[in-house]
Amino acid sequence: MSIVQVNEHTFRLPVRARQAHKGDFGRVYVLGGSVGYTGAPVFAANAAVRTGSGLVFLGVPEAIWSVVAVKCNEAMPHPLDEDKNKVYERISACDAALIGPGLGQSDRAWGLVHDLVSRLEIPLVLDADGLNVLQGRTGLLTGRTAPTVITPHEGEFARLTGQPLPVSDRIGAARAFAEEYGCVVVLKGYQTVTAAPDGRVWVNTSGNPGMAKGGSGDVLAGMILSLIGQGFPAAESAAMAVWLHGRAGDFAAGELGEYAMTPTELLDFLPRALMELSE
């Protein structure tokens, strides 16, 4: 059960085949958004595009669809169907899905997330409100046949596990949860911990306090989704995305300062971070 300190030498991104087309780099789906929270799903979708996904679909409630559509150029937003089966069918056609950014905690949102987590047989990333449905229902994770990545900060992790704050042994706690429930745990915070179900752990070394702003986590979730959709293993995708996310934040802080940088700048500086890992 190894513990790896992640740095610029831990992962490499392969050279893309010259004859490749957009279908070769993943069809991914982001489900999120609610009235007052239109930025979160857009950050996630744009991060998936920026990290290399070939096709990015974004499902949002009809009430905010027009607002989200204006914010998207590369990602393809659409209003969610009222029929849960049609939502399920649309997401099932993708290679991976992210559920939760800005989704809210309405009864309909909770019912939809519960249904999708129970039924979908593609890799899932559960973030923000996508995690809330797991409170008291962590057994949903063990019933899944495809990889699942959860991305809690310490408060969300404490609610999931019943542990007091602060989490005293972040590595041990993340590893124990990952092993028990068969999922990848990204326990966010200073030196973010990524734990795999087989006991492997990655501890991040990039990032800075300037990233502690609303929207940063949505960017990270979209990056994890993108790498999984491109075919990288779930645990490695999560650990690599965490490092890239922090590295982009370090570039942003170096040019803009920790006070002024925003999640938008994370997307702007992400290409520089990606180039560091390119073969």
Image (cartoon, rainbow, N blue to C red):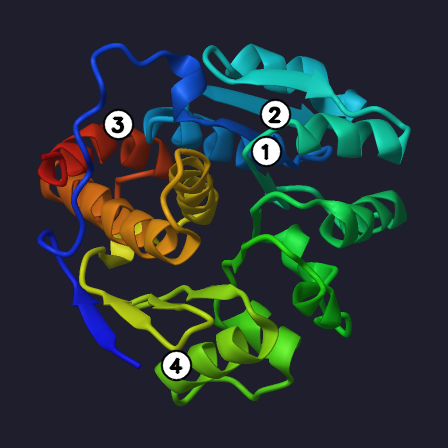
State yes or no: discs 2 and 1 in contact (Cβ < 8 Å). yes
Image location (x, y in percent) of residue 119:
77, 48
Whichever of labels 3 and 2 marks the residue nearer the N terminus, that label is 2
The residue that label 3 is drawn on is 268
- Residue 170 — which label? 4
User: What residue do we see at 28% from left, 68% from top?
Assistant: 202
Query: Which amino acid does the dot numbered 4 rest on?
Result: Arg
Q: Secondary structure at mark 3?
A: helix
Q: Secondary structure at mark 2?
A: strand
State yes or no: discs 3 and 2 in contact (Cβ < 8 Å). no
Whichever of labels 4 and 3 marks the residue nearer the N terminus, that label is 4
Q: Secondary structure at mark 4?
A: helix
Image location (x, y in percent) of residue 195:
40, 70
Image location (x, y in percent) of residue 186:
43, 63
**Figure disc tally:** 4
User: What residue do we see at 46% from left, 45% from top?
Assistant: 221
Q: CA distance from mark 1 to mark 4?
A: 28 Å
Query: Which amino acid does the dot numbered 1 rest on?
Result: Val
Looking at the picture, does residue 224 appear above or below residue 72?
A: below
User: What residue do we see at 26% from left, 10% from top?
Assistant: 19
In front here: 169 or 146?
Answer: 146
Residue 187 in which image quadrant: bottom left
The residue that label 2 is drawn on is 58
Whichever of labels 1 and 4 marks the residue nearer the N terminus, that label is 1
The residue that label 1 is drawn on is 30
Whichever of labels 2 and 4 marks the residue nearer the N terminus, that label is 2
Q: CA distance from mark 2 to mark 1?
A: 5 Å
